[in-house]
Image: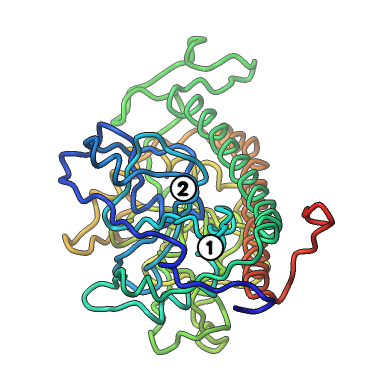
């Protein structure tokens, strides 16, 4: 019996463990739905639609099925903090199977477990710290059935599980709404970018689309372009520099945040889980202070070319040496739209990747990025596009800022709710009051 009279069990008292499928690469890309390592690693709950396929047999689909309430844990990883990341299925996925680098925990029916509660419990700091303390580290971190059997789960009464989940789901639904808005705003920006700068159908003075209304085109090394436009480079539009080389001995648990490549995800920058340096050690890197609306880019490693827009921020942050910062000036929102959409063009990304030197750890220099050739529009059209898209990118950074606050609130509540420090008030019908 745990705090507040809540029941505490070993995982093997509540769940049956099953390993996933390990198959040859040639068996993927066709067949039946497949839960990947990434699906588990990046999501509290298994995505509604599975995008990967695997060629599986009837027996494999029977033994490695995916049902509502199933918990998936990453059983092996390169670092301890990436081990035991969880995702919970909230529905049955017909004919689906799951990855061999994960374990499936299926409720054995002896205890009442609300799947949404499980999704938050297994991602809670309480469970994450237990994973880290009990897992083994050889060349890779790993979880086996013996270790998993000794891990604990705390179960409040079912109605309290549902009430707790309802509170946290409301926060996640708002986060997801903001993400959908941002995705739509980005899509709109890219559609207009393509119309203006790829199809050359930007509006003339009279409002007619340029190319289809006999706008004059001239030859260039990148093909036909509008008259008065030119072929230039990214560096003609904006300069980029590698961040500051902070010493490993300077890292602290608090102070001034330093953005590393790992903090660039989903086209934005997460500053809630950064490394930190003191004010004194940050003083030499003042030119690498980042502000909302600026663009950062990964300049080394497997994710070279990954870029992100910096959200609105309420604290200072700096850029580490393997991250590049584009210098857009004092008013980045006046110029960020064209840069963001340019970096999102596949040929630009491919060019960045191809210029990465080194086989084991590819790197690209600031000059390598700046020298990539692009079409430079006439300044009047460029300014018009940036003005038109400015509100979109302001809204995107505002939504990410709000999401970061919601995530922090959710994680704080998660810690307090799972420990019983905060109890969920329920009315006589068992609803959250």
Q: Which residue is drawn at 62% across and 38% down?
A: 389
Residue 241 visible to the viewer: no
Decide: is 336 above or below 403: above
The x, y position of residue 43, in whole percent, is 48, 53
Q: Which residue is drawn at 40% across and 72% down?
A: 81
Q: Quadrant of residue 240?
A: bottom left
What residue is pinned by disc 1? Answer: 270
The x, y position of residue 371, in whole percent, is 32, 50
Along the polypeptide, which appears first: circle 2 or circle 1? 2
Decide: is 315 above or below 59: below
User: Which element is circle 1 on?
Assistant: loop
What residue is pinned by disc 2? Answer: 46
| Left-right relation of 351 to 181 | left
Q: How many marks?
A: 2
Distance from label 2 to label 1 (Cα)? 22 Å
Residue 181 visible to the viewer: yes
User: Which element is circle 2 on?
Assistant: loop
């Amino acid at each position: 019996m745990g705090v507040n009279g809540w029941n505490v069990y070993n995982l093997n008292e509540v769940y049956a463990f099953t390993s996933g499928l390990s198959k040859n690469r040639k068996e993927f890309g066709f067949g039946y739905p497949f839960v990947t390592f990434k699906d588990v690693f990046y999501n509290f709950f298994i995505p509604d639609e599975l995008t990967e396929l695997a060629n599986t047999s009837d027996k494999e689909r029977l033994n490695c099925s995916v049902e509502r309430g199933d918990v998936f844990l990453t059983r092996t990883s390169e670092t301890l903090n990436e081990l035991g990341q969880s995702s919970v299925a909230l529905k049955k996925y017909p004919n689906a199977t799951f990855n061999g680098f994960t374990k499936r925990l299926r409720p054995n029916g002896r205890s009442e477990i609300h799947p949404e509660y499980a999704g938050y419990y297994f991602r809670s700091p309480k469970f994450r710290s237990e994973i880290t303390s009990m897992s083994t580290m050889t060349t890779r971190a790993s979880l086996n059935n013996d270790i998993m059997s000794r891990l604990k789960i705390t179960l409040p009464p079912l109605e309290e599980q549902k009430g707790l989940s309802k509170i946290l789901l409301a926060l996640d639904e708002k986060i997801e709404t903001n993400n959908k808005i941002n995705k739509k705003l980005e899509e709109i920006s890219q559609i207009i970018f393509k119309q203006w700068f790829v199809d050359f159908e930007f509006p003339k003075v009279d409002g007619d689309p340029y190319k289809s209304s006999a706008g004059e085109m001239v030859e260039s090394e990148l093909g036909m372009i509008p008259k008065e436009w030119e072929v230039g480079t990214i560096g003609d539009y904006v300069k980029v520099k590698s961040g500051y080389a902070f010493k490993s001995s300077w890292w602290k648990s608090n102070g001034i945040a330093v953005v590393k490549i790992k903090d660039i995800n989903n086209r934005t920058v997460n500053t809630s889980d950064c490394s930190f340096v003191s004010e004194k050690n940050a003083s030499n890197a003042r030119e690498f202070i980042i502000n909302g609306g600026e663009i950062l880019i990964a300049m080394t490693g497997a994710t070279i070319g990954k870029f992100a827009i910096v959200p609105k921020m309420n604290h200072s942050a700096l850029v580490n040496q393997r991250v590049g910062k584009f210098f857009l000036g004092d008013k980045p929102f006046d110029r960020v739209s064209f840069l963001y959409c340019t970096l999102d063009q596949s040929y630009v990304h491919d060019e960045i990747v191809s210029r990465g030197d080194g086989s084991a750890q590819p790197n690209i220099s600031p000059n390598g990025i700046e020298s990539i050739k692009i079409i430079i529009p006439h300044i009047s059209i460029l300014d018009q596009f940036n003005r038109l898209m400015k509100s979109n990118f302001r809204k995107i950074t505002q939504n990410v800022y709000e999401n970061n606050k919601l995530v922090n609130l959710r994680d704080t509540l998660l810690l307090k709710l799972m420990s019983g420090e905060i109890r969920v008030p329920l009315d006589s019908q068992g609803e959250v009051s």
